[in-house]
Image: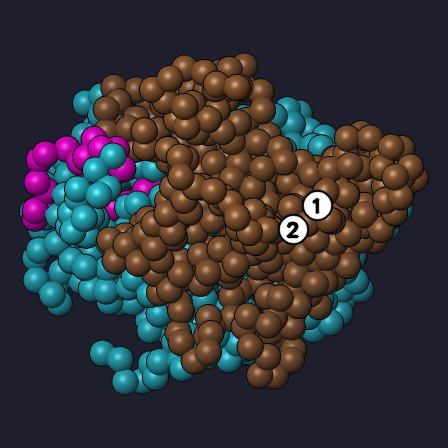
Chain colours: A brown, B cyan
Amino acid sequence: MLYREAGQFITHYRADQRLFRLRQDRIGFYLLLASAFVLVPYCGNDYWFSAILIPFLVLSLAGMGLNFLTGYAGQLSLGSAAFMAVGAFSAYNFNLRVEGLPFLLSILLGGVVAGLTGVIFGLPSLKIKGFYVLVSTLAAQFFVQWVFTNFAWFSNDSSSGVITAPPLDVFGLDLSSPAGRYLLTLTIVTALGLLAANIVRSELGRNWMAVRDMDTAAAVIGIAIPKTKLLAFAISSFYLGIAGSLWAFTYLGTVEPHGFDINRSFQILFIIIIGGMGSILGNFLGAAFIVLFPVLMSHIANGLLVGVMDSGHLENFQKIVFGMLIIGFLIKEPNGLASIWQTFTQQLRVWPLRYWSH
Amino acid sequence: MKVNINKCAGLVLALNLALVATSPNARADGEQYFPLQSYRIGPYAAGGSGFFGGFIDYLQYVNLKEGGVNNVKLTWSECETEYVVEKGVECYERLKHGLNGAPAAATNPLSVGIAYATLDRSTADKLPLITINHGRTDSTDGSVFPYIFPLQLNPYSEVSAIINYIGTESGGLEKLKGKKIVTLYHGSPYGKETNGILELLAKKYGFKLTLLEVPHPGNEQQSQWLNIRRIKPDWVILRGWGVMNPVALKTAQKTGFPADHIIGNIWSNSEDDAAPAGNAAKGFISITTHPSGTNFPVLQDIDKYVIKASKGNLEDAKRFGTVYYNLGVVNGILNVEAVRVAQEKYGKRPLTGEEVRWGFEHIHLDDKRLAELGALGLVQPLKLTCSDHEGGGAVRFQQWDGSKWNVISDWVQADRDLLRPIIEESSHKYAKEKGITPRDCSKES
């Protein structure tokens, strides 16, 4: 009923290539964007911006980065946090050392440096496959952290190796308030998200999927494997680098190399596993699950159980519940939350009937 | 928080459910609130549960004995951070607006990482950020960091006091010339913070310094200690954290280095650092800003009013009077004193963070006031000002006898006049980077 496609005919190639072919999907997407850009800044408060929405958006972006590499191109990686660190520290140094460089441009340059680093650590993937690529990215994870901890130049000789956010001026606007930081993050994530949705539908995205599904077959039909793999590393790391800058500058306002340790890499990997490999929407769902759920549970637990249970036990109890939920979800739907959403919309399209009529 | 959300209550109803659940109905007007970003699970739970146990017990004690500060009751709530920066930030944002109308006084995250991440926020929200015995050294300069307080002892003072002690032990600072000192430090921002200042002191006094890094977490130190055996230093300064400390002591014993020439820093000084090393820790010296033990009137009182009334916060009653617990009590004393000082200026009512900050900047604890508080010998004399947010800069030395710490020195002062220009250089660099105009402290009342 809601999802009636009757009367929607595609008459142009351009219409066929749209991101959302169904009118209902398009309207839904525009409404979502409008509420994110207008309604949320109007309704939200500091807590929602600083503690929930910004990390949610940044982690979604990071998930997107890893999803290119793992979900689309099929290369396993445990170095996501390292590329985030490269992005953050490069952006910081560009901003500090180049007089008058606009803030957005330094973030972009940080992403480029991260992308190049990604290519270097992606080189071994030309010779080795599968789990062994994981080891190369693991090397990136430890090497990058070591470099930033041991060479004080990167943190401008800060005695503790911590970098702090430059003033958040974009085109003369001061965006340092929580709502401003949210809008800045949202704008960047929306732009990169739309770009991502188009990349994965382009020739490059299709090449990635061909390499993922069977690289010999891909080579046989004439796909240049080295170029495809290295581009996956480059673009993935570029996204992660930007996410790293946002994490450091719009979310925390400060970061030390230790903040990008292997646990962060695992967190991003879990986001794409729970959200859905090879899906753009999945990154947002996965990040929402990882960020929102523990917070929600801790609010509920604090409201209902405080005083009843020791606060340390309460925290452990939440971890158990969260872990069980993850296991439950993955048993029910191993392809992630995006797949649940897809099944749901498919059913909505035929509702109130039960099956497609062929 | 509630007011803001109610603007669009209908739209965020689902999200609101969780928040409604957290707001007990009782209004708490007329109370002063302490938001506690505590950590009781995770790798650093020993420190967190001891510190926050002591802190909460002291607040409880002020309520039970005196009915609060000038009849303004103290209230608090906890939010678990696990020592993780993002969780600390979430907790900060969750708690900063106070509780049921009671305004927040100050935040005390007891974590360098969380302190760094909430530094700008605290300044913007006008809520004091207390980093007792740790934190960012240059935040001592209150003209650039108006809301940040590394109370009692910043990392530079800590090192300077250790060198002064070694000097005294050697028969005068001039005798340091030619001595060999090794610093074994944790491979983290915290561990590295003092390397520069140690090199400066080595140049000034002419001792030979070797810096050895122990990679995190520090459970393998064989090569470092073999190195130490080769160097044959007169003293080893242990700048450790967590598991690194007992491992250092055990490995020292194996390589034959005497424990009584190892000096632990402020995060290598608890019972939890020495006791696991067993016999190897006997004779180990460390610094402390406060002795452990229960022999102080204030701790006796806490025992009487809080613990005996089964209102204590500690799960394990044996930890009463340990280093971490007493640090929590000291922190409680300083926070409550700031509220009290500020009340004299602003009136006997719940205060905003900005008002409490004025209180912190005017804390003046001399021996007379400390005796009134029952904390003589537990807290060092302390005078804070607009430009000096540290105040003390003195430590005492204690020695582990195999089962407990015994204080073996009087207060040893850091060479703060030497450190001040270095701190100011660093804080001004920060001010320039962030575009901050420092306050003029001569105009502050």
- Residue at left offset 35%, top offset 80%: B439
Dot 1 corresponds to which residue? Answer: A205
x and y percent of residue B186 in the render?
Answer: 67, 46
Q: Is A92 above or below relative to B278?
A: below
Q: Is residue A165 visible?
A: yes
Q: Nearer the viewer, residue B321 or A147?
A: A147
Task: Tell me where the magenta segment starts and ends, as one range.
Answer: B15-37
Q: Chain of mark 2?
A: A
Q: Is A355 above or below relative to A185?
A: above
Question: Could you tell me the amino acid type at mark 1?
Answer: Gly
Dot 2 corresponds to which residue? Answer: A199
Dot 1 falls on a residue whose secondary structure is: helix
x and y percent of residue B354 in the render?
Answer: 23, 64
- Residue at left offset 78%, top offset 36%: A210
Horizontally, residue A234 falls left or right of residue B277, namely right
Pointers 1 and 2 in contact (C-beta within 8 Å) = yes
